[in-house]
Amino acid sequence: NAGVTQTPKFRVLKTGQSMTLLCAQDMNHEYMYWYRQDPGMGLRLIHYSVGEGTTAKGEVPDGYNVSRLKKQNFLLGLESAAPSQTSVYFCASSGLAGIEQYFGPGTRLTVT
Amino acid sequence: GQQLNQSPQSMFIQEGEDVSMNCTSSSIFNTWLWYKQDPGEGPVLLIALYKAGELTSNGRLTAQFGITRKDSFLNISASIPSDVGIYFCAGRNSGNTPLVFGKGTRLSVIA
């Protein structure tokens, strides 16, 4: 039982490049989330999903897209990376009540 | 949007001391959670609180759901070096709304 996994762990992009971050969970959770963490800013919600095939915007959705084609996976896409998107990205999942969230180990992204 | 205010932002304590931190909101919450983040890792759930006035322990950690439903407290007794990290509070006020996170309290323990 791996819990929540994220790939890749580290990535460096040039401005304008695109990439996809993958989150996978093996707990059969309904809800999945993408956060970014910047120094002094805590965790800010980017997008989330309340079930397979559904997505919703969080606090800071601009510049990101997401997809939840399978219940166990939640993908975060950056179509045209900007230096302001340099951050640590965390994925989380929670069960039907959507309360207790379990986090992955994070992806450190640098955009130059 | 909703905000949670955590205090203190950071603290330095001696090993063996007790620690207190809190989280406040301008609106009522139905659920409070406390997480710990070790350096380079994702946050880990420590304690979840579901009722006003609830007091819950997890080893040396004790958290309380304030009776006004606008605050929560976390205490750590007899701190040890592995308590170092960032402690986040999180809350939810209704239905399926996502959790709101505080900005964290950074704890340093001096041996």
Image: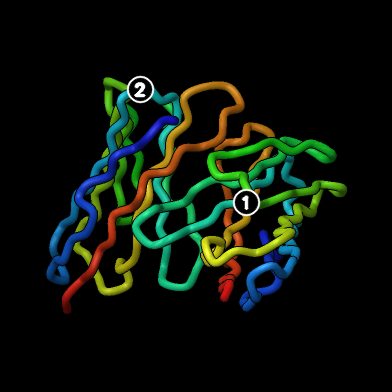
Q: Alpha-carbon neighbours of circle 1 within 10 Å: few (<14), some, or many (≥20)?
A: many
- Judged left or right of residue B68, residue A1 is right
In the picture of the structure, the residue carrying the numbered disc 2 is B27
Q: Is residue B92 above or below residue A86?
A: above
Query: Distance between the Cα atoms at labels 1 and 2?
Result: 24 Å
Q: Nearer the viewer, residue A16 or B2?
A: A16
Q: Position of residue B42 (x, y in %)?
A: 51, 63
Amino acid type at mark 2? Ser
* x, y percent for residue A87: 52, 65
Judging by the rendered image, the residue that carries numbered circle 1 is A34
Describe the element under mark 2 as helix, strand or loop.
loop
The residue marked by circle 2 belongs to what chain? B
- Locate the N terminus of chain A and report the quarter of the image it occupies: bottom right
By what rule are the colours in the image chosen?
rainbow
Instruction: Out of A43 and B42, give the one closest to the viewer.
Output: A43
Give residue B105's quadrant in the image. bottom left
Left or right: residue B70 versus residue B91 is left
Three-letter amino acid code at disc 1? Trp
Q: Quadrant of the C terminus of chain A?
A: bottom right
Residue at 50 percent of width and 69 percent of height: B41
Image quarter for residue B26? top left
**Rendered position, A102 above or below A82:** above
Horizontal arrangement in the rendering, residue B40 relative to residue A34 (left or right): left
Mark 1 secondary-structure assignment: strand
Q: Position of residue B62 (x, y in %)?
A: 29, 46
> Label 1 lies in what chain?
A
Q: Position of residue A98 (x, y in %)?
A: 62, 35
